[in-house]
Amino acid sequence: MTTTQPASTNLQERFQPAGNPLREGLRIERTPDPCAMVIFGASGDLTYRKLMPALYDLALERLLPAGFSVIGFAHRDMDAESFKAHLREGVERFSRFRPIDDAIWESFAEGISYVRGDFNNPEDYERLSVELTAVDTQRGSMGNRMYYLATPPEFYANIVSCLGAKHLTHREDGAWQRVIVEKPFGHDLESAQGLNKAVNEGFDERDVFRIDHYLGKETVQNILAFRFANGIYEPIWNRQYVDHVEITVAESIGIEGRGSYYDDTGALRDMAQNHMMQLLSLVAMEPPGSLHADAVRDEKVKVLHALRPINPDLVNRSAVRAQYADGFVSGKQVPGYREEDRVADGSLTETYVALKLFVDNWRWADVPFYLRTGKRLAKRVTEIAVHFKPVPHRLFSSQASQNLEPNLLVLEIQPDEGMALKFAVKVPGPTMRLRPVNMVFQYGTAFNTGSPDAYERLLLDAMLGDGTLFTRRDEVEAAWRTVTQILDGWSNLPDDQIPQFEAGTWGPMEADAFLNREGRSWRRP
Amino acid sequence: MSASTRDLHSELDLESSFTVESIESELKHAWAELGAQAEESNTLAPVRTSILTLVVVARGEAEITDARATLDRLVRVLPSRVILVSVLRDKENISARVSAHCAFSLSEQGSCYERIEIETGQTNLRAIPSILTQLEISDLPTFIWWIGPVDLRSPEFSRISRAAQRVIIDSARFNHPLESMGHYAEYMAHNHGDLAGTDLTWSRLLAWRELLAQSFDNPAAQEMLSSLQRVDMTYDPGYEADALLTAGWLTSRLGWEPDAASETRDTITFSACDQNQRTVRFNLTEISGAGIGLRSVRLVSHSGQKSSRVTVRRLDRQRAAVHIEMTGMPRQQRVVKCIDNTDDQVLGTELLQFGRDQVYEHALNHAARFATMI
C-alpha cells in the first residue's frame, strides 16, 4: 500500500487537477482508489434493487477503479455463483442501462464473492478477513475497504464491534476503511446517540457515511446551485422579504407492504427527521465558505441547532399528526391505514405530519417554516415554496388588485424538476387590472438527459471520501433533538385518538386549521 | 423519449418575402400555433426554453440530409434555436423556412426547440453572417458546426465562424485530416482568446482519454508516467488523425516536446523529448480492420526495478479491454464500455461545453507539429 486519499476529500478537490496530468478536462477528477466493498445484508432487497444496479451502472460508465470488488456478507446459505446470479437478476431489472451487457457484467462479476455469516458471530468475521486478504492479493484493492451496513440498525453495533475485534476497521499502512450506514439512524435522540457512539468506536467520524438518499438527488443538489450560483436571490432570502416557507413531501402511495416497519416508525421519523430536515437546512443555511464537505455541513447543522425548541406540553402548537382513512387515489379505491397488512388494530401511528418550525437566527427570526409530509395524499410531489411578503404600499386600487397575491417562488423537486415564480401583471385592456401569472422553468425542457440514480452518486462519493452529501453525526443528532421534543409531546397527550383524513386528499382539516388561524393556507401543488 | 411521445410541429415558409424581421414574426406565429395545438390535444403548454444558438453549415444535399437527421435527434435532448444554413450550388437568392417543434411524453413537460432553415447559394454566403448576428439568441452562447469538409484557410470559413463563440469541425470528414489539423491549429492561434474551437474527432476519443487517464489515477501508477518509454498505437485505415490527436494529447499533457518523425508503409514513428531530454517513442501502426477507428494504445514504462504496461484495446464497437501490468501489483484486466457514439451524441457533449477547451487546443498543437514532421 503506498498512499490513499484523505476521507475529507471534497467536491471542489474532485474538480481541480490533482496528481494525474492526464485527468485535466475529463468528467471527474479521479476515479476512486482500488477498493473492496463489503455489503452486510447482501441478500436483501436494498442490495438487489439499489446497490448492485448502481454499482453496475458505475462500472458501465467507467467510474469504478480497476480491481473493484464486492463481498456479500449475509446469513442466507448460498455460494458465490448463486449470489452472482441473484445480483444479476436485480441488475437486469433495475439498472438504468438495460439490457445489460454480458461481457461487461462478466468482467464486473469476476470481483464478486460471498461470505455466509451471522452478523453477531465473531468467528464468521475471521472468514471475512481471509476473503478480504485474498481480494487484496488477487485484485489489488490495496487494503481499502468500504463496509455497507444494509441491515436493520440493531445489528450496527455488533457488526462494528466484530469488525474491530478482527482489526478490520483500522490499518496502519494508510489504507482507508469506511462505513456506510442506512436510515433509520435511530428511533429518537437517545438511540441515535447510542448508535453514533457504537459506530464511532470502530470508525472515525470522517470515515462514517450516513446515507440519506434524498441528498443524492440531482434536484436537491440543485438547491445549492440555485441559491449560491445566482446573485439575485440571496439579497431577498431573509426575514425582510420572506413571509414564510412551505416544504411539502407528499406521496400518493401507501405503506406498500411495509406495515410492520412503518407502524413502529411513522411519518415523523420516516420522513421529517431526515429528508425534510435536510431540505430545511439546505434552504435556510448561510452560504458556506467553500464546497468542502465540512464547510457545507457546518452551515447545515447551524440551521438545525437554531431550530426553536418545542415545548412538549404545547406540542399541538407546532405539530399536527393524522392518519389516512380509506378513500380514492387516482380513481382507485384504497384502504385506510388501519386496514393495511401488518398494522396494529387501533394503531395511533401518524401517516401524516405537519410542523411549524422557527429558525432562530439573524436571517430567519420569526419566519415560520411549515413542513408537511404524508402518505396517500392527493399526489406525489416534493417542493419548497418560498412565500414573499406583500408589497409595502398598495399602489393600485382595491378593484384593480383584488386578485393580487404576494410573490411566490417554488422549487420543484419531484416529479417535475424546476422552478416557478409567481408575479403580477396588468391584464390587457383600457383599465388597470392586475392578475398573477406564473413564469415556469423546468429542467426537462432544458436538459432532457438522464440523471444518475441517487445511489450511484452517493456510492461514488463515499468511495472518493467525499462526505458532502452524507449526514454528519451532529446533523443527525440535532435533527433528532427537535423530532424527539415532538415525540415526547405526543406521548404525553392524554387522548388515544388521531385525526383521520380521506385518502387522496391533501390531509386533515386540523392541518388546514393549523395554518388558517395564522391567516395562511397550504399550497395546492 | 418513450413510445407515448407526442410531437407538435408548426412550419412556415418564407420563400418570397424574406427578411430577418419576417423570420422572427413567423417564429412567433409558429409558437402560437404550437400553443393552440397543445390546447386542442389537451397537452401541457409548450415551454420555450433555450440554452444556446446552434448554427449548422451544410453544403449539398447529402450534408443537408445528414444535418437534419442529426439535429432531429439532438434537439430532443438539447432545446436550442437551430439555424441550418444550407448551401446549394444553383440557389440564387436566400430563402428561409421556420418551424417550431415540441415533443411531449404523456407524463412530462415536452422538450421544445425552434429551427430556422436558410437556403443560399455560394455567391450569397457573404451575407449570411449579418443574418446570423440578428438571429442568435441574446446572452446565450452561439455555436457553429461545419458538418462537412471546409477550407479552414478560406475567408468564408473565417467570416461565418466569427458569428459564433465556439466553432466545431469534424476532421474525420475531411479529405486530408492531418493537413487540416495544421490549418485548424493555425486558425485557432490566429483567433487566440476570441474564439473557442473543437473537433468531433476529439470528442469521439473521450472514452480513450478517460480509460488511459484512469489507469494512472492510482498514485503508484502515476509514478510510472514519468518513466514512459514507448507508446504503441494501432488504428484502422483512414483513422490516422485519431491516433495523431491521441499522441498530441499525451505529449501535451505530459509536457513533452515533439522531436522527430518518420513514416514507413504502414507505421508512423514519432519521438518526443521529456523535460530531461529523455526520448519517448511513438509507433502508430495502421492495421487492416473493421473501420472502427483507433484500435489499441499501449503505454510501456521502465524505471529501475519497476515496469508497467497499460493496454487499452478495442474489442468491438461497444467495448474495450483494459490490461494493467505493474511491478508489485496483481495483473488487472477488465472489459469496459467504449461505444461508437453517434454524431448527435458527440455534438451534444460538445454543446454542453461553453468555454475554450485548452486541453484540446494543446493536443491539437502537438498533433499539428507532429503532422508537419512527417
Image: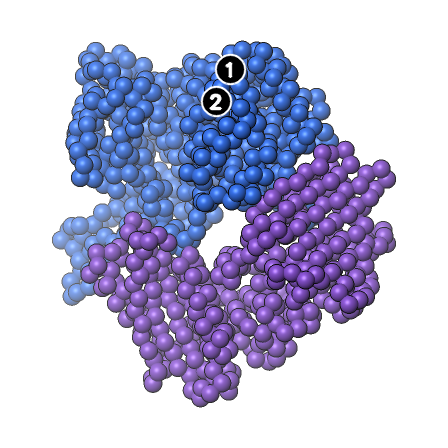
The single residue placed furthest to the left in the displayed view is A399
User: Residue shown at 24%/32% (left/top)?
Assistant: A376
- The answer to whether residue A98 shows anywhere in this view is yes
Q: Which residue is mark 1?
A: A119
User: Residue shown at 79%/45% (left/top)?
Assistant: B301
- State the residue in front, B221 or A289: B221
What is the C-alpha distance between the residues marked 2 and 1? 9 Å
- Among the chains, which one is blue? A
Q: Are marks 2 and 1 in contact (CB under 8 Å)?
A: yes
User: Residue shown at 24%/48% (left/top)?
Assistant: A393
Residue B17: x, y in percent?
Answer: 33, 84
Q: Is residue A69 above or below residue A163?
A: below
Colour representing chain B: purple
User: Residue shown at 35%/27% (left/top)?
Assistant: A272
Q: Which residue is mark 2?
A: A41
Q: Quadrant of the C terminus of chain B?
A: bottom right
Residue type of the residue flagged with mark 1: Phe
- The answer to whether residue A370 shows anywhere in this view is no
